[in-house]
Amino acid sequence: PAQRVGALLAQMAARSVALDAVTIKSAMRVYARAGLPNECEALLGGLPLLGAAPSAHTYASLAKACATAGDPEAAEVALREAVRRGLRADAVLFAIVAEGYASQEPPRTADVTRLVEEALRTLGEGALSLSLLHALLKAHAR
């Protein structure tokens, strides 16, 4: 799918078809699942050119791409950049980064715990997601 998205975006550019924010965000989600952070970051950088602002969801796609690629530190940088830009990092974004740390060999339990604690402080207990708690259990179980 990621190669097809890249080819489609290239065809659109060759035909001078303007990209819109929805197309870019959809492509970012595909690149995120494929673990292609450079492609996600390039698309994220193009949003302001379209008059669209990056959102917590676009930063979640970038974080997911980084975590899937095995780089949880870069995923956390995406989380921090979202917060720096005044976006509200939700439990999903925290969970993506925590899952990245939990998937390391060996699992980076202290980093997962730190993120869960930060999410609790920032979001409150009622806003936690099962994904975030799953990352905590995964890190401690391995």
Image (spheres, rainbow, N blue to C red):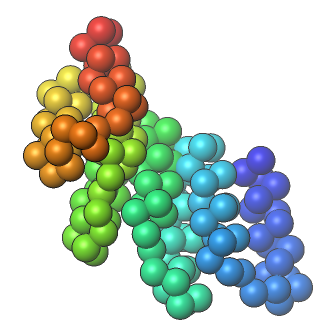
Q: Is residue 73 above or below residue 4?
A: above
Q: Residue at x 51, y 71 (%)?
A: 44
Q: Nearer the viewer, residue 71 or 135?
A: 135
With respect to residue 71, does 14 lie above or below?
below
Give the quadrant of the C terminus: top left
Name the residue at 55% across, 80% down. 46
* Of 71 and 31, the residue lying toward us: 31
The outermost residue toward the top is 141
Q: Whole-percent x and y of residue 138?
A: 34, 17
Q: Residue at x 37, y 29 (%)?
A: 130
Residue 97 showing in the rendered view: no
Q: Nearer the viewer, residue 125 or 17?
A: 125
**41 on left or right of 29:** left
Q: Residue furthest front?
A: 126
Residue 142 lies left or right of residue 18; in this view the side is: left
- In this image, 14 relative to 57: left or right? right
Q: Position of residue 109 (x, y in %)?
A: 21, 23
Q: Position of residue 23 (x, y in %)?
A: 70, 70
Q: Does 62 appear above or below 132?
A: below
Quarter of the image where one finds residue 116: top left
Q: Position of residue 100 (x, y in %)?
A: 37, 35
Q: Image quarter for residue 125?
A: top left
Residue appearing at x 32%, y 52% in the figure: 90
Left or right placement of residue 31 versus residue 122 in this view: right
Asked if residue 42 shows in the view, the reply is yes
